[in-house]
Amino acid sequence: MGWTDERVELLKKLWMEGLSASQIAAELGEGVTRNAVIGKVHRLKLSARAKPTNTAPRSRPAARPSAPRRPSTSSSSTSTMSAKPRVSMSRPQVMGATALAASPEMDTEVYVAPAAAELFIPEDKRLNLLQLSESTCKWPIGDPLTKDFYFCGQHSLESGPYCEFHSRRAYHQLEKKKR
DNA sequence: CCCTGATTCGC
DNA sequence: GCGAATCAGG
């Protein structure tokens, strides 16, 4: 779908209201990605959303060595393809003053706090060192010097040695700690 | 990992 | 003009 006047206006409005590109894309409907939104925003020259008192130096040589762009026709490269439609994503995710701008459906949502509950592994699910396997979460729990030590043991992700919960946890800690 | 906007460039 | 891919950052 092209950019009709209406859609452009909505884009402008939402952008100026401070919504993120992905949120605007979701608002505009299917077939519109956040990249499309950002691209359009740039073309409209309304990038500067809020510039109180500062001349942004815009220092960025950017880097585009010579990597091949889109492979027009995705031939059959024999490998495990894991498609991720990225469509079923509708997340309010409150941020700043943006939240009240778009709210098609404000339902009575019940928020169930995850927290500690997910960290508790029933005894019959705990694993010792010898019980670990490829698809087993290797997140250690407890004191290794004590009998009170075991591994998470949940089914681990393809992308790592941990289950979803612990994988996320490990990552965040690492990035934050990173130098 | 999740996400953000910015940029480039084939179409 | 459009937007996917990529970059750079949080």
Image: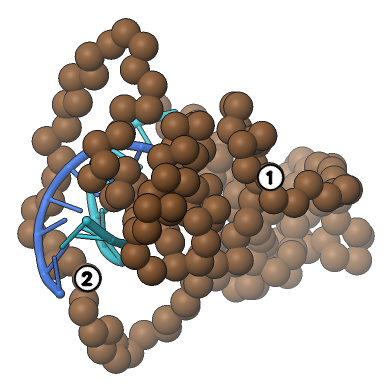
Chain colours: A brown, B blue, C cyan
Residue A92 drawn above or below residue A138: above
Q: Residue furthest right?
A: A123
Near-viewer residue (A68 or A125): A68
2 or 1: tag closer to the N-terminus: 2
- Asked if the residues shown at circle 2 and circle 1 are in contact, with their CB atoms under 8 angstroms apart, the answer is no
Label 2: element kind:
loop
Label 1: element kind:
loop
Decide: few, some or many residues near mark 2? Use Cα within 10 Å; few <14, some 14-19, many ≥20: few
Is residue A47 at least partly visible in the picture?
Answer: yes
* Chain of the residue displaying label 2: A
Q: Position of residue A48 (x, y in %)?
A: 31, 27
Mark seen at residue A23:
none
- Quadrant of residue B10 in the image? bottom left
Residue at 91% in and 59% down:
A122
Near-viewer residue (A4 or A110): A4
* Chain of the residue displaying label 1: A
Q: Is residue A149 left or right of residue A88?
A: right
Q: Quadrant of the N terminus of chain A?
A: bottom left
Identify the amino acid type marked 2.
Answer: Arg
Q: Position of residue A4 (x, y in %)?
A: 37, 58
Residue A49 drawn above or below residue A113: above
Q: Position of residue A169 (x, y in %)?
A: 63, 45
Q: Is residue A54 left or right of residue A88?
A: left
Identify the amino acid type marked 1.
Answer: Ser
Residue at 30% in and 34% down:
A46
Same chain for the residues under marks 2 and 1 in the image: yes
Q: Mark 2 or 1, which is nearer the eye?
A: 1
Residue A48 drawn above or below residue A38: above
Near-viewer residue (A123 or A89): A89
Residue at 53% in and 47% down:
A23
Q: Which residue is mark 2?
A: A70
Q: Which residue is mark 1?
A: A103
